[in-house]
Image (tube, grey):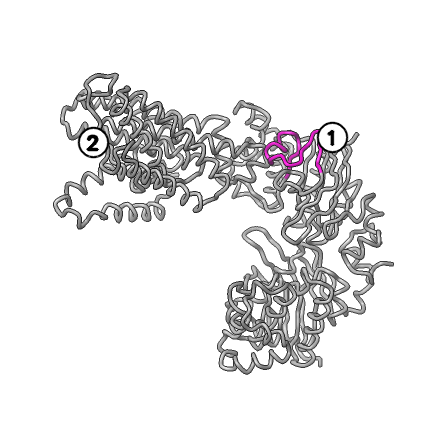
Amino acid sequence: MTLLRVSGVTKRFGGITANRGITFDVAAGELVGIIGPNGAGKSTLFECISGFYAPDEGEVELEGTRLTGLSPDRVCRRGVARTFQKLRPFQGMTVAENVMVGALTRTRELGHAREQAHEWLRRVGLLEKAGAYARTLSTGQRKRLELARALATGPRVLLLDEVTGGVDQRSIPGLVELVRELHAGGLTLLVIEHNMRVVTAVAQRIIALHLGEVIADGAPAAVTRSPKVVEAYLGQAYVT
Amino acid sequence: MRTYAPALAFFAAAGLVPLAVTDAFLLDSLVLILIWGTAAGAWNIAGGYAGQISLGHSAFFGLGAYAAALCGVRWNISPWFGLAIGAGLATAAGTIIGFLSNRLRGPYFVIATIAVSQVLLIAASRWRGFTAGSEGIPVPFRPGFWTLGIADKRVWVWIVLVLALVVYLSQLYLERSRRGFQLAAVREDEDAALSLGVPARRLKVAAIAASAAFTAMCGALWAQYVGFVDPLYVFSVDLSVRFSLAAILGGLGSALGPFLGAVLVTTVETWLRAEFGGLGSHLVGLYLILYGSALILMVRYAPQGLMGWFYRR
Amino acid sequence: MSAAPQLAVEGLDVAYGDFQVLWQAALHVDTGEIVAVLGPNGAGKSTLVNTISGLLRPRSGSVAFEGQRIEHMPAHRRAGAGIAHVLERRRLFPFLTVHDNVLLGAHNARARPHREETLARLEELLPLLKARRAQLAHTLSGGEQQMVAIARGLMAQPKLLMIDEPFLGLAPRMVQEIGALVRRIRDEHAISVLFIEQNVELALRLADRGVVLESGRTVLAGASAQLLRSAEVKRIFLGDFAL
């Protein structure tokens, strides 16, 4: 059953076409990795899906409901949440309060939001930091906070932007495990990742972008061996 | 931070002083402190809680003042209606400025707010036929509660105190409610808040509109109290600065802060006038220098304002 | 030829706050070499080059240039010592002319007295500089800006020129020209070149040697001929399934 449908999404900035005719469907419960060299248009795609940019052409639909052109807060309330590549915790709030902002999108009661926040913090392993201020967290912990905050909005689809970026090696397996657990719990995920090991470990399906277009879409092994993908990343010489 | 003792003390004192004191000067100071404190509190709703710093709030103050004055002078309507009309006009103006806040960020927004207040200043001083132009409008004193013609300063204290309490409680609401929580997130990082489903734009507009309405009410009461509306004063940038200054000195984003800031600002001003009044126009800008210095010192040593200094965060 | 390397970087740990980006990174450049710094996005390539030029300070490790330790030297003095850094996306001063942009490159004390001479020689190397002397930098095309940026770097009379992504956003023809320029800089002016590049094949066809970073660590280094077609390179960029 198709949950998220992206059809023909095109986005231009001045003379540059960042996304060109991007089309793919995501079924409920899928975990799709989005890869591509720098400048391929991955982040732009997320911005178009999450409502920060309105695509110049094309549509984004969630279970048949049109998301194209909606403001980001409305996209979130419809059920698509996202994290940011550059972490943006609310500095003046505690960890729990950060997550409460997400929870308040689903509930009106502050007390209930606080409970939910604590529950999400427990799920991501940050409960003991609930009362701490966001600025005291390590990078790996901040990534978990971003996750918990987005999850508190109760999304159907979660867009993860570089969840392992900038995280030290030792913390990566823990984060990957967390993503796996969330997926196992039934969440549909789109994951932008530069770390190939991470993405091939969690994704059942990979979509590769290059210069704004989809150049491959399929199982990790097939995609990473596809000549177009090898050429995009490394050059013709590496295509066997 | 959750103790209300200071606020309780402040408002109780304000309410009880008129019973114990009859000195006109002290009562007058108290009325002014309460008016400026309330206006600063209204400013704080937009500036402190929503993070929308404006230096054009005199636009709303002036609208309220003129509405009250004109109602009395031109149409013989009770200034209480003027207060409501002024609040309505200010809400409309505030909504427009709220939309501006979604198009302009930071310093550009501030400049736009200044522009709005100055446009109103020019309109009021030139529109002779309607507003009696730059000469201003003397507000008629017709004794009676309904006409807000009250000679007894003690009663004035209590009237303004009611509005002060409403604004104080509104700020408290912003600290405790779901919408207030979301607004705090918008203040910290609007895009992150949007991504979490917070209707940032709507909230900002609502905060600015509410802030505008309350400021206009202060203007209306002030016009009736002082008895004269001068466009060059009620729409001035100086006045806008005073609202923000009192709020910032008192503690941005704290409910009692603006009132404490108003105490400080009004006291200093009164002292200045007393000390340097004789020197006339030579030192007219002196209070601005003092304000500026106070701001610099405060930002450097006590960024949370007086409230922060009390609680030693 | 077996002399100590011109640039030797060892054991570099670099962090932004408590966000560690490089772990024990290392590389070296011999005099007269062209070396490419490669790696997937976020691997720390720019961080490494920024640390060499002084825009960042390492937590630990060493950067030695011509035998002298420079990891704590202020950036502007490293320019005087002989290292020029051309930043990612050119970063020309948009509202200054080509002439002014280029001249500013000779700010350091060693190069300043010879500014005009150096400029004259560069204009021979790059006729574009003369032709567009008075043009405002932001009106140039990407490729032209890149040339001007490189010229600005060369005005410092460096012994080592470091370029962050010289081919970013350039049309294929421009890529050829810049590549040829880099070779001439090394061949005719005996200046070593260290550059960062996303496209592996492109980089290794230009460079003598390559250094590959992954997640902040130096994981592979070798002669270009070796690295081209290397399975290990494939694995680093595309994961285990790619093999």
* Nearer-the-camera pick, B88 or A115: B88
On the image, the x and y values in percent for residue A211 come to 73, 53
On the image, the x and y values in percent for residue C83 come to 58, 72
* Nearer-the-camera pick, C161 or B67: B67
Residue under numbered circle 2: B29
- Please provide the residue range marked out in magenta: A59-82
* In the rendered image, the vertical position of residue B84 relative to residue C224, given as above or below: above
Q: In the current view of this chain or complex, which residue is farthest to the left?
A: B278
Rendering quarter of residue B65: top left
Q: Amino acid at mark 2?
A: Ser
Is C192 on the left or on the right of B12, as rendered?
Answer: right
* Nearer-the-camera pick, B64 or A211: B64
In the drawing, what numbered circle is on residue A186?
Answer: 1
* CA neighbours of label 2 inside 10 A, class few (<14), some (14 to 19), many (20+): some
Whether residues under marks 2 and 1 lie with C-beta atoms below 8 angstroms apart, the answer is no
In the drawing, what numbered circle is on residue B138?
Answer: none
* CA neighbours of label 1 inside 10 A, class few (<14), some (14 to 19), many (20+): some
Q: Identify the residue at horizontal 50%, vertical 36% (top origin).
A: B186
* Nearer-the-camera pick, A177 or C122: C122
Q: Is residue C79 visible?
A: no
- Between circles 2 and 1, the one closer to the viewer is 2
SS class, disc 1: loop
Q: Amino acid at mark 1?
A: Gly
**Residue A78 counted in the magenta span:** yes
Q: In the current view of this chain or complex, which residue is farthest to the right?
A: A240
Mark 1 chain: A
Q: In the current view of this chain or complex, which residue is farthest to the front?
A: B129
Q: Identify the residue at horizontal 71%, vertical 81% (top origin).
A: C1
